[in-house]
Image (cartoon, grey):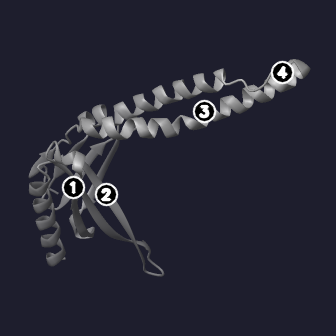
Amino acid sequence: MEDTPILEVKPVVVPAQFLVGAPLVAAFGALFPGVFALVISNILGALMGGDRFDGPVVVYGAVAYALGFLAMLYLAYLKVFKEPERTTYAVYKDRLEYDEGLLVRQRRTLIFDQVIDVQLTEGLLQQTRDAGTIKLVTQQLVASGEAQLSNRQISLNNVPEPRKVYDLIRSLALEKNRAG
């Protein structure tokens, strides 16, 4: 395997993804701790208060919801703004190597002769930054006795100049599959 990549790509930050998606994800994600705190506080209030229990206690649920919302919003911020700083996609003649992850780092290698499909998606929010997502579909043998094949998708998210990168990866994968 050669050591010099043909192309190294760092994903771009797409702030619109945070502004549109993060509040929605955080609002739904915070429902669980909010409802859980509401139910538990009301059960404990009824058990401890006895006849003096005046009705539902909403304050604890609201506080838990607000804290959960802020925590989920912060995690989304890390995912959208900080993770791309630590992600690199390196395209070689025979493979793709990439490092990704913020809290848990992963280094992976994808050999092009396993690639059966390359897809390019340029979402509406990604188009604001001339970015896109490239999906590589691989087919691998998972059980040699019965010759079972499994498909796996690898996504390269928020790739700048996605058409150029797509064309390069597609041509290298086609070249490897013709040679193999």
- Left/right placement of residue 165 relative to residue 82 reads left
- Left/right placement of residue 57 relative to residue 110 reads right
- Secondary structure of the residue carrying tag 2 is strand
Viewer-closest of 143 and 23: 23
Q: Amino acid at mark 3?
A: Pro
Q: Is residue 93 above or below residue 61?
A: below
**Label 3 sits on residue:** 33
- Secondary structure of the residue carrying tag 1 is strand
Image spot of residue 162 (x, y percent): 14, 53
Q: CA distance from mark 2 to mark 1?
A: 11 Å
**Label 1 sits on residue:** 96
Point 22% across, 50% down: residue = 124
- Left/right placement of residue 57 relative to residue 17 reads right
**Label 2 sits on residue:** 154
* Nearest to viewer (mark 1 / mark 3): 3
Location of the N terminus by quadrant is: bottom left
Q: Earlier in the sequence, mark 2 or mark 4?
A: 4
The reply to whether discs 3 and 4 touch (Cβ–Cβ < 8 Å) is no
Q: Earlier in the sequence, mark 2 or mark 3?
A: 3
Image spot of residue 161 (x, y percent): 11, 49
Q: CA distance from mark 1 to mark 3?
A: 40 Å
* Nearest to viewer (mark 2 / mark 4): 4
Viewer-closest of 149 and 31: 31
Q: CA distance from mark 2 to mark 4?
A: 55 Å
The reply to whether discs 2 and 1 touch (Cβ–Cβ < 8 Å) is yes
Task: Report crowding for label 3: few under 14, some 14 to 19, many 20 or more residues within 10 A (C-alpha).
Answer: some
Q: Earlier in the sequence, mark 4 or mark 1?
A: 4
Q: CA distance from mark 3 to mark 4?
A: 23 Å
Image spot of residue 66 (x, y percent): 53, 25
